[in-house]
Image (tube, grey):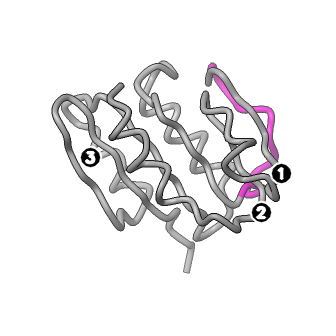
Amino acid sequence: MNREIKEKTLQYIPEDFSGVILDLRNKLEHICPEAEIIPVSKIHGKIGVDDESVDMAVCLKLHKLGDIENSLDEICRVLKGGGTFIACLKPCDNFRTILKDKFNVNSYHTAGHYAYFEAQKRTVS
């Protein structure tokens, strides 16, 4: 992955963030020293985290987690309503449609073979 894309993706994280982060393959301890970080290296089935218990999910290589649709379902399950999802990936053909079905996409950029974005989990009305 291009270092510039990684840096642009991580800029979505507020410097003073102190909530709970689901850290998918990133090692964010140095970026968010005040946050409670839950590391996850792969998503196979369910993530071992309670429903709606995470404020933010961050993943710099979403395409390496396995099944994209299952991964987004699990990330959506564990994020609190309105929780933030920040990621970078090599998108598959229907990725944006799958993403928009679950999240409000605030920012989505492409650079070469990668896309990076910041989105919020939809709240149930």
Q: Which of 12 and 55 is in front in this view?
A: 12
Q: Where is residue 1 in the image (x, y as percent from the top left)?
A: 36, 25
Q: Do the residues labelled 1 and 2 touch (CB within 8 Å)?
A: yes
Q: Which of marks 1 and 3 is nearer the N terminus?
A: 1
Range of residues picked out in magenta: 44-54
Question: Which is nearer the eye, 68 or 125?
Answer: 68
Q: Residue 96 carries which label?
A: 3
CA gap, disc 2 and disc 3: 27 Å
Q: In which quarter of the image is residue 52?
A: bottom right
The image quadrant of residue 25 is top right
- Percent across and percent down for residue 7 are 43, 45
For mark 1, what is the residue?
36
Residue shown at 43%/60% (left/top)?
119
Indicate the amino acid at tag 2: Gly
Residue 41 to residue 17: above or below: above
- Residue 29 at what x, y percent from top left? 75, 42
Using the numbered discs, state the Cα–Cα distance from disc 1 to disc 3 in whole angstroms.
29 Å
How many numbered tags mark residues here? 3
Mark 1 is surrounded, within 10 Å at the Cα level, by few (under 14), some (14 to 19) or many (20 or more) other residues, namely some
Decide: is 8 above or below 19.
above
Is 34 on the left or on the right of 72, as rendered?
right
Q: Which residue is drawn at 32% across and 62% down?
A: 107
Residue matched to label 2: 19
What residue type is disc 3 on? Arg
Residue 123 x, y percent position in the rendering: 56, 72
Q: Is disc 2 surrounded by few (<14), some (14 to 19) or many (20+) residues within 10 Å?
A: few
